[in-house]
Amino acid sequence: MLLVKGGRVIDPESGRDEVGSLLIADGKVADFLPGGEAPGTFDGTVVDAAGKWVLPGLIDMHVHLRDPGFEWKEDIQSGTAAAASGGFTSVVCMANTSPVNDHPEVTRYIREKAASLGTANVFPVAAVTHGQNGKEMTDFSELFEAGAIAFSDDGSPVRSALVLRRALEYAKAFDFLIMEHAEDHELSEGGAANEGWTAHRLGIPGIPSAAEEIAIARDILLARLTGGRIHIQHISTKMGVDLLRMAKRAGLRVTGETAPHYFTLTDAAIEGYNTHAKMNPPLRGEEDRMAILEGIVDGTIDAIASDHAPHDEYTKRCEFIAASNGIIGLETALPLSMALLAGGRVTPARLVELLSTTPARILGIKEKGTLRKGADGDVTIVDPDAEWEFRESDVRSKSRNSPFFGWKMRGRAVAVLCRGRVTHSLGEGVSPDA
Amino acid sequence: MEGGATGERPRERKVTPMEWRRKHVLGLADFSAEEIEFVIDTARSMEDVLTRDIKKVPALRGKTVVNLFFEASTRTRTSFEIAGKRLSADVVNFSSAVSSVAKGETLLDTAKNINAMMPSIIVMRHPASGAAQFLSRHVSCSIINAGDGSNEHPTQGLLDLYAVIKAKGKVKGLKISIIGDILHSRVVRSNLHSLGRMGADLWLCGPGTLVPREMGRSGATVTNDIREAVRDADVVMMLRIQLERQKTAYFPSLREYARNYGLNSEVFSLAKKDAVIMHPGPINRGVELSDTLADSSQSIILNQVESGVAIRMALLYLLAGGHNAAR
């Protein structure tokens, strides 16, 4: 038994936003006790949450754990430790491992290894096509039974519109979700940064926004054609947001996510050939950044996901064009997202929707993303006023590829419970369960 | 400024007593007009050496210059080699064809190995933009960028400026049109800084596929019409069509390219009477530049090459501390 005492409980799913205490028993939310006062005697661990926010465990619906196959960059142990440290109780890991997660054995391996550690819930995404080759579909239902939560060839798009059409049509019968990395590979080929003045000036081959937007438009039209359910990953451009907004107005079953770097940075960050600002899709212009913010405010964008992409140092310590794409994000996604609160246009409840409620709904995880009685005991306790600096030495991930070292952050997960177990704590009398 | 290459006695010219603080020459983006003038002045005094019977001075004796070339190059590498040797440096050439790069070594490892042999200066050409800047953060010797991808080719930018000054006596107010593959050209990016900073009226021209619209933000005038670019120009600089850089076609054919963007006598007649033609080489005769014009009296292409040695001597000299030591 565990009591999270006297915090501001924000749970959009149940419409709750009030001070109270949460009782966690048998890994589930057992009760909510309103008010700042909790029972005088309690026979269990007490987590003092006075002045803190108590949120349904955060869900990062887009991470790369690199396990199996690239364990020197990250593995399930280090990746889930980074998740817990960053305030996440659940992560959705992409299929571009080695071997690719296109076989139930790989899915089971990930599930079992994560379960044995218990640091965070890991929901594997299986590939849409064998070896992510874009040609033959994987065995969706068998992969689902093995524990796959959705299907994506992330890292690459499903290049063929026909193959994606078939996947959407086939998946529809099971109500499986297809997640798409939207990119027209021919338009983006050879590119290493957003096509714009900065890249032109630096002589870096560009990736036009249209490479992403054409693919998003295609994916939306295929959702319309098939009635299938599709989720657009890591939206980075203004027109991408506009297209998603249009699709939603048309009543299509399309959702979309963005990543904190797309509303925090622009392509100006690549100045000096900074490989830690290189990712795919690339950081875009200021107009795009503002449009992403607008999409977050008006509800067009459903979720914020980190696209946590660990890479070893030497693949970033090289020529810009040769550097690997991506940055780690699990430990910065929450504070960077909390920066959205400053303007007042994003409320704390909306933030919880973006980081927990809606990802759970999109992924169909009913027992998560909420603090309802009976839900899983996944709880993230946040100090909204904590001021801290993101330092390389604090990183739990095996990789260090982040453009945010030295940044002053405001807001931090001070304790995390995963199925009632303490998986992260910044002291104050509570230590992570062994 | 004095005009013409004739009759000038560089030795008598007083070099601006400016302090040279640079360790590397990575690009001209952060060069001030004053610094550029200082390099040109130093090149003038170097040119004096080149007119002697014995074209060698001991300024860099005991210093080693490594030409680290990861891309094929004849003239730039040779120019640097001659520049180094005329200053009495020991010059070592390292080209990727015979190197360990083929064995999969990273740029950084290759450079660190060379750095460990304690050269004074590495002159590097590399296909990746930013490669020189990257290297400068990881080695202890000086770096001269001899061309990095599509980013910069600072010595070319300086020698082009020098060649224009020698031909026209000034740069300020001249209409200088650069025509060809603007998108991939490091020569353009360095010239935007060198010629641009000295007050030229710069024009960039080429097919729509090779002139990014955003290049207008450089301060240059952008056009797809070669006649507009050449009309009343003082200097017309043709760029090599780099077929080797193009994986997909940026224009239908060389014939079509020559028809719309090649410089021939008819188009060149639109330029000022005393206009000059430049080209960073190597020329594709009959493609971007007609055979006749390439060899005409208005071509200063070989003067560019000549200026190149002086500019490179000047930079090697300045980076090796020759200037500060002499003061």
Image: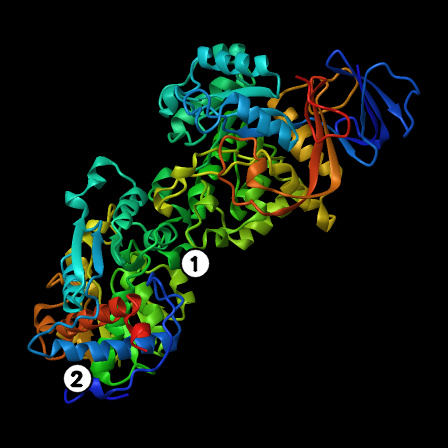
Q: Are marks 1 and 2 in contact (CB under 8 Å)?
A: no
Asked if residue A85 is positioned above or below residue B215 in the image, the reply reads above
In-front residue for pair B136/B140: B140
In-front residue for pair B286/B146: B146
Percent across and percent down for residue A258 are: 57, 39
Residue B272 shows up from this direction: no
Circle 2 sits on which residue?
Answer: B5
Question: Callout 2: residue from which chain?
Answer: B
Residue depicted at 63% across the width and 30% down the height: A85
Callout 1: helix, strand or loop? helix
Residue depicted at 37% across the width and 19% down the height: A136
Which mark is drawn over residue B323?
Answer: none
Q: Is residue A239 left or right of residue B106?
A: right
Residue type at mark 2 is: Ala
Which mark is drawn over residue A197?
Answer: 1
Distance (Cα) linking label 1 and label 2: 38 Å
Q: Which quarter of the image is occupied by the N terminus of chain A? A: top right
Residue depicted at 69% across the width and 28% down the height: A357
In the image, farthest residue toward the left: B53
Q: Residues within 10 Å of mark 1 (few under 14, many from 20)?
A: many
Percent across and percent down for residue A197 are: 43, 58
Q: Which quarter of the image is occupied by the C terminus of chain A? A: top right
Q: Is residue B265 left or right of residue A1?
A: left
Question: Callout 1: residue from which chain?
Answer: A
Image quadrant where residue B29 sits: bottom left
Residue B212 shows up from this direction: yes
Image quadrant where residue B295 sits: bottom left
Callout 2: helix, strand or loop? loop
Residue type at mark 1 is: Trp
Same subunit: marks 1 and 2: no
